[in-house]
Image: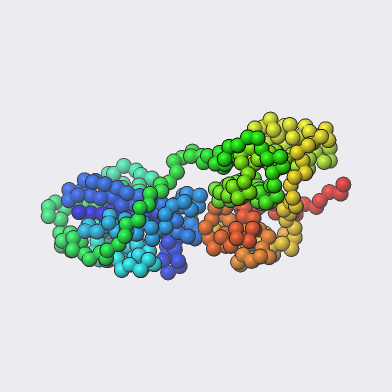
Amino acid sequence: MYAVIDLETTGLRTSWHDRIVEVAVVHLDEDGQVTGEWCSLVNPGRDLGPQLIHGITAAEARRAPRFEQLAGHVAGLLRGRVLAAHNLRFDASFLLAEYERVGVQAPIDPADGLCTMRLASHFLPSAGRSLHDCCRAAGLPPYRAHSALHDARAAAQLLARYLTSAGAPPPWEAAITAAAGLPWPPMEVAPVVPVHRRTAGHREQHFLARLVDRLPRLHEPKGDAYLNLLDQALLDRHISSTEADALVATAEAFGLARVDVEHLHRSYLADLAGAAAEDGVVTASERHDLNQVAALLGLPRSDADHALQSAMNGSSPEQGLRSNQWSFAPGDMVVFTGAMRPPRWEWEGEAEAAGLLVGDSVTKKTRLLVAADPDSMSGKAEKARRYGIPIVHPTAYRQMLASLAKPTPAR
């Protein structure tokens, strides 16, 4: 009878190339009873926009199906039903735009559906326009805002209240009849699995666990390419999901099993310990950094202690396998991507004040890309990965900027 929808998007306008990043559909029968629900994240093929609002990370969305893969299934959920949403005009415009991108003229028209926001003026005259205000005025329980499924459930409960108040038949009976006859074009339903948001506290399996187990290790694993990639990944002391995938792919391409990669990780740690112990003094900050890197590499803290002790004693047999280390200097070009706080222009001003060049787009001359989400799927991020340009989080970049401003002490 009814298909109540809600979307999370990268922004507010389809004309600005904003896309859907999450879609949810809740089915109601003629009495307002829930008969089914469905939800999935959507890979928008671009940056995710205001992530502080919708809370979806690129690590989640990048593994979700694209809309063209979901289009047939979503059409099946809407076909023959009255489309409803809170601010239906907004959701309908995004659905129409997504279907147009895949060459489908979807029979979606806000005038033919039910907008729980507009209907509130009749059923809840004292309520504000927001879904939260309408639900509160209707005496409905609080819900998790800016989650497509929770918002769709809340809108469905609101519509159920309207149905109870309206009685039978409802004043929009003509819309029910019209929806049953809307001519949806035939569409293939691809066999895709919906991807849901991660639960709070979810932790991904360490990427080492995805590598093949084999003993013994190679006599001398050829790890230059792997270590170069690891250098870039660890610039911000965080290994993003995209970087973890790249490390696994590189290890597999060079025939490196888990034991080989663990050996390379220990050699990497030994190099860091050697750099920390070079002046004969290991600060608390340097020790903390070693422990942090060890944890990121899937190594126990005892390995960091051993690497540091060996470096202080001048005996580090696994040291020296790293190739040229990445460095950052005045005159380098930095590019920014994603919605940031404070505003982008403040970040760019700080970069220029530190002697860096700020680029509008990523080129082979770009030294660093600063991304609000290091797993970003923006065009800038995709180009940076193609060119082998490091991508770091703004917090780590700011630390790098502070180090860049400090004069290097003479040895």
Residue 297 drawn above or below residue 100 = above
Q: Residue at x 15, y 55 (%)?
A: 170
Q: Residue at x 66, y 63 (%)?
A: 366
Instruction: Name the spot of residue 285 as percent of width and height, x first.
Output: 72, 39
Is residue 298 visible in the rendered structure shown here? no
In the shown orientation, is residue 34 left or right of residue 209?
left
Relative depth, front residue between 217 and 181: 217
Instruction: Name the spot of residue 144 as percent of width and height, x first.
Output: 38, 45
Looking at the rendering, which quadrant does residue 349 occupy?
bottom right
In the shown orientation, is residue 51 left or right of residue 173?
right
Is residue 139 visible in the rendered structure shown here? yes
Looking at the rendering, which quadrant does residue 343 occupy?
bottom right
Instruction: Name the spot of residue 307 as percent of width and height, x first.
Output: 74, 35
- Furthest residue in direction top, as rendered: 302
State how many labels appear. Answer: 0
Relative depth, front residue between 346 and 237: 237
- Furthest residue in direction right, as rendered: 411
Q: Residue at x 27, y 44 (%)?
A: 139
Residue 107 drawn above or below residue 232 = below
Relative depth, front residue between 227 and 137: 227
Instruction: Name the spot of residue 380 as percent of width and height, x first.
Output: 57, 62
Q: Could you tell me which quadrant the N terminus lies in?
A: bottom left
Q: Which residue is drawn at 62% across and 53% down?
A: 392
Residue 234 drawn above or below residue 304 = below
